[in-house]
Structures are given as C-alpha cells and as structure tokens.
C-alpha cells in the first residue's frame, strides 16, 4: 500500500503531519512602488557627495552643452549627476564605466543618484574623457574646500609609486622596421576600403571598419614617434634593440611586483596622512621612482598653494638628489635608507682602507 505523503512515520508507529512550507517562486513578475528617497539613509555618503558637487562651480561643464531650451534636441544628463556617479564609484573602488552602468540597475546608492534611471556606459566614458581638464580643475577645487575647512593640513604627506599594467601585451612591442611595415599595410587597407556608402556592405559597417583602420593607423604613428623619443636618449647599440607598443604607444616595459616585467605606467600618489585624502597624482614613463619626489611636491603645491611640511617615502625615493631637492624646498624628508651592496670587507682591506672608513661606519 502506498504511503500517504502528508504523514511521516515515527519510530513508535505514530504519524505526524508534514511541515507545510511556502514555496519560493522566482519566475513571477512583481510591480511594486519604490520611494527613491528611502533607498539610502539620511547620513549615507552618496548624499554628501551629491551636495558637495552641487556647491562647486560647474559652469565649464554646462557651457559646452548644445541642448538648450527653445531649440529642438534631446535633454542631456546633468553634469552634476555624472560627476557624482564617478566620485561615488571612485570612493567604492570602481573605475569602469561599464561597471557603473551595471550598478545603476540594482545598487540603491546609484539608483538614488539617477532616480532609478540607467546611464549608458558610453555616456559615462565619453564624459570622463571629454571633460578631463574641467574634472582635474574640479579635483583641485575640492582640495581647496577641504583645505579651507582644515580637513587637509599637509603636515605629513605619504608618497609612493605603483606600477599600473598598460592595455598592451608583450607581443605588441615591435622594432622600428616592423612598425613601419604595419603602418604601410594600414594605409593600404584604408585606401582599399573605397567609398563607405557603396552598396557592397551596409553604410554603418563600412564606416565602422574605416574608423577602426584609421585608429590603428594613428596608434602606429604614435608608436613610431614614441620610438624616436626613446632612441634619442640611447646609444647606437641600444637603438637597435628599442621597441614600442603598437596598441599602447605611451606604455613602457617596467619591473612589476614579484619580479615580472611587463608593459606598464608608473603612477605616483601623494596622500595626506591625517585626512587620508589624495592630494596629488601623477603618471610617468620612468621605470623607477628615484626622480619622482620633487615633481610630486610641485604637484601638491600647484593643487593646494602650499608645500607639505613632511614627506614620508620608502627606500626607492631616498637618494642624494631627493634629499637635496627637499632641503632646498624646506620640506622634511622621512624615508628608509635603501639597502646598499657595498664592497666586501676583504677587498677594502686589500686596498688598504681602514675599518674606521668602511661604509658601515657612516650609516
């Protein structure tokens, strides 16, 4: 006889009703009201960012907008919104326009900013690139406000460099002859494309192909210019080994973490020790940090109108040139002495050097 599924047999022959559970239906569609103001708390950081951006001078951003009242055209996203999205994203460690657009679909803080709208990632990326100078000035204005309120003191600034991997592979680095061959082929392909409005392929596809080829041609030209700059500072023997990337001409091969070499940029970051706020950022092609301390101090002074009282660095930035530059600028330098591989004591003894004058005596 088939057992009744609504009962469970116990050890003593008794029967107990099966638990009645509520099934979860994830296939259903729901229509529910959403009060946008309640998506985030009143003291949420995203509200502070929105208020801060709203108090800044945004005229440089509005001046270039062609969509105005009384003239045909679609309305554009408010620059205050786009700036706030980028600032909040940076605060959360997000630097991708695609990721910000994805977060706008479900994250409460981003939804509160946009009013439940989704901003296209193209819009975010184009804004970040097109308004670079205005955004850099905005960064300086924010630092000025924080300094005026006493949140940034520059009493002590921590500075260090880090290698950032470039958008290029090791195989994209070529010698001058190879780059010239690629450039010649790219020009031939552009010429062979013909009229983009011809009927062989759709107009949109043809124009996209031409644009891609033109961009490739421009990158190759930039790579050749970068190669010439590198060759100008090298000997005749080294010039033959010089290479440049055909996809990211500004990148240079650098020593990265864990001893690996790869196409990179050298990012220099200065942070106020008390406020934990970045007060200066620079990007260089130098493979080491040895000569980057003085430019870092100059960037801080340009951003805030005053020099830091102290600079704290690691051994990679502690050298004679940096010490002399900081002394001249009246900035206290706090740094670790780099490990020096001096001459072995036996060789010093053979040269007749007294132990009182060994390098260890002067540390």
Image: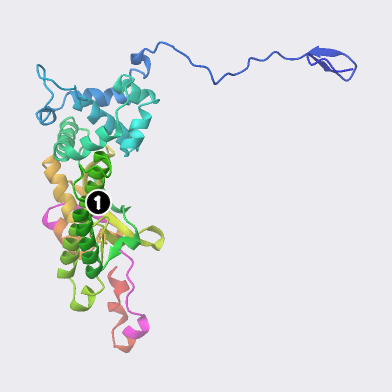
- From the viewer's side, name the closer residue of 128 and 45: 128
* Residue located beneath label 1 in the image: 268
Q: Is residue 336 visible?
A: no
Question: For residue 219, which quarter of the picture?
Answer: bottom left
Residue at 54% across, 20% down: 27
Q: Position of residue 5 (x, y in %)?
A: 79, 16
The relative height of residue 17 versus residue 292 in the rendered view (above or below) is above
> Residue 319 at what x, y percent from top left?
23, 63
Nearest the eye: 2 or 86: 2
User: Is residue 159 or residue 266 the one in the foreground?
Assistant: 266
Other residues around mark 1 within 10 Å, as few (<14) / some (14–19) / many (≥20): many
User: Which image quadrant: the N terminus?
Assistant: top right
**In this rendering, does residue 146 appear at all?**
yes
User: Which residue shows up at 41% across the image and 60% down it?
Assistant: 258
Q: Percent x, y for residue 25?
A: 57, 18
Q: Residue furthest front?
A: 199
Q: Residue at x 37, y 84 (%)?
A: 346
Closer-to-camera residue (150/301): 301
User: Residue 6 falls in which quadrant of the image?
Assistant: top right
Q: Which segment is the magenta one?
A: 327-348
Report whether 65 appears left or right of 338.
left
Q: Residue at x 13, y 45 (%)?
A: 301
Helix, strand or loop at label 1? It is strand
């Amino acid at each position: 006889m088939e057992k009744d599924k609504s009962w469970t047999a116990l050890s003593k022959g008794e029967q107990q009703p099966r638990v009645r559970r509520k099934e979860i239906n994830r296939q259903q569609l729901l229509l529910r009201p959403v009060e946008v103001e309640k998506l985030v708390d009143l003291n949420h950081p995203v509200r502070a960012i929105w208020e801060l951006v709203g108090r800044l001078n945004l005229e440089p951003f509005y001046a270039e907008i062609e969509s105005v009242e009384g003239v045909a055209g679609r309305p554009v996203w408010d620059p205050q919104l786009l700036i706030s999205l980028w600032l909040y994203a940076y605060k959360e460690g997000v630097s991708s326009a695609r990721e910000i657009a994805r977060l706008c679909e479900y994250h409460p803080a981003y939804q509160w900013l946009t009013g439940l709208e989704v901003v296209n990632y193209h819009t975010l990326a184009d804004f970040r690139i097109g308004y670079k100078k205005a955004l850099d000035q905005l960064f300086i204005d924010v630092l000025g406000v924080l300094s005026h309120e006493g949140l940034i003191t520059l009493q002590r600034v921590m500075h260090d460099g880090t290698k950032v991997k470039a958008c290029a592979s090791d195989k994209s680095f070529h010698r001058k002859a190879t780059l010239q061959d690629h450039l010649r082929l790219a020009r031939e392909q552009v010429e062979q494309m013909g009229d983009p409005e011809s009927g062989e392929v759709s107009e949109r596809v043809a124009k996209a192909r031409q644009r891609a080829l033109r961009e490739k041609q421009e990158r190759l030209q930039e790579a050749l210019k970068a190669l010439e700059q590198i060759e100008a500072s090298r000997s005749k023997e080294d010039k033959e080994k010089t290479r440049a990337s055909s996809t990211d001409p500004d990148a240079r091969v650098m020593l990265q973490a864990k001893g690996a070499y790869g196409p990179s940029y050298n990012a220099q970051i200065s942070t106020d020790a008390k406020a934990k706020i970045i007060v200066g950022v620079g990007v260089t092609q130098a493979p080491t940090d040895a000569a980057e301390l003085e430019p870092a101090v100059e960037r801080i002074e340009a951003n805030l109108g005053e020099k830091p009282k102290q600079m704290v660095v690691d051994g990679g930035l502690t050298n004679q040139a940096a010490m002399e530059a900081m002394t001249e600028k009246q900035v206290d330098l706090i740094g670790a002495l780099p490990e020096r591989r001096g001459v072995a004591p036996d060789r010093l003894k053979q040269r007749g050097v007294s132990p009182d004058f060994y390098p260890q005596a002067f540390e």
